[in-house]
Image: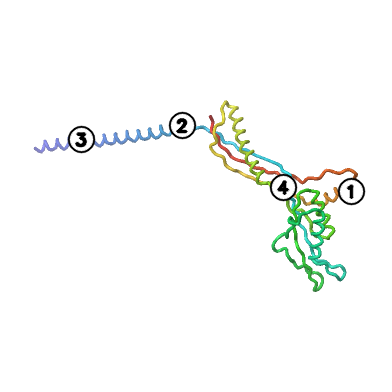
Amino acid sequence: MARFLTIGNLVKTKFEKQLKTDNMKHILILSIFMMASYFAGAQISEQGAKPYIEVVGNGEMEIIPNEIYISFTLKERMDGKKKITIEDQEREMKKQLQKAGFNLDNLSLADASAGFVPVKRKKQEVLTSKNYIIKVATTNEVASVFDVLDSVEALNADISRVAHSEIEKYRKEVKIIAVKAAREKAGYLLEAIGESVGKPLMIQERESYDDIMPMANYRMKAMSVMADSEMAPEELPELSFQKIKLKYSVFARFAIE
């Protein structure tokens, strides 16, 4: 009886080992199958993805400014014992500007605190000053304004900045130029290898800036031209300011067909 039990235990043990072995084989086969399926799927995904090309397109444009801002200061001064007030100078300045054909709507205070700035002079004497900005459109108008400012003895007259009334429109045009340049570049690069450019997959803005040259010495040049034009019998062409250069670039991705 004991012998039969021993044989039965041996058979049972052998069967359990075989079962564990079979289970391990099944698990191993299943794991291999899952890994194979994963790599096969990844390969199919990579093979199914469309190829693309990435390029950078640039756009540039130069425009002549039509908004020129001149800043200057009027300060009370003494003529002997008589004080020439800001109000008197401002009244005379506006009168001469209107006579020269300027719209006073383009004349304003430089900032909110430009009203009255005390300037100490000598003992107890205190003079005041006002800072102004006037907008003009051409270099001839700049020269006329400087004439008026010289006549009223304005101080610190200078061109503070230049701009263009439609600069936003031109910025948009430069962006369009940059996008078209990116597509054109992708086209000729792909053409070199016998491919053609497809639909855009991504267009990303990169950078945009305006390059404006300083106008520090313009007054001297303008006065010199005016003097020359008075001496010359023929009318000289109007000077123009340094152009505003608009630059823009985009990063683009196009499908390859």
Q: Disc 3 designates what residue?
A: 15
Residue at figure coordinates x 81%, y 65% from the top left: 88
Relative to 207, say whether 15 is above or below: above
Location of residue 254 by image quarter: top right
Farthest residue, direction left: 1
Residue extending farthest bottom = 124
Q: Residue at x 10, y 38 (%)?
A: 2
Amino acid carrying mark 1 in the image: Glu
Give the residue at x 69% y 41%.
61
Of helix, strand and loop, which one carries label 1?
Answer: helix
**Label 2 or label 3, whichever comes before in sequence order:** 3
Residue labelled with disc 2: 48
In 3D space, how far apart are the residues under numbered discs 1 and 3 (Cα atoms)? 121 Å
Sequence-first disc among 4 and 1? 4
Q: Is residue 217 visible?
A: no
Horizontal and vertical percent for residue 132? 75, 59
User: Image check: 197 left or right of 216?
Assistant: left
Mark 1 / mark 2, whichever is N-terminal: 2
What amino acid type is highlighted by mark number 4? Answer: Ile
Total labels drawn:
4
Instruction: Give the distance between the C-alpha atoms of the residues marked 2 and 4, in whole angstroms.
Output: 49 Å
The amino acid type found where label 3 is placed reads Phe
Q: Nearer the viewer, residue 11 or 19?
A: 19
The label number, if any, that marks residue 230 in the structure image: 1
Could you tell me if the residues under marks 1 and 3 are in contact, i.e. CB atoms within 8 Å? no
Q: CA distance from mark 1 to mark 2?
A: 77 Å
The CA distance from mark 2 to mark 3 is 49 Å
Verify CB contact (< 8 Å) between mark 3 and mark 4. Answer: no
Q: Which residue is mark 4?
A: 212
Q: Quadrant of the N terminus?
A: top left
Front residue of this view, candidates 14 and 37: 37
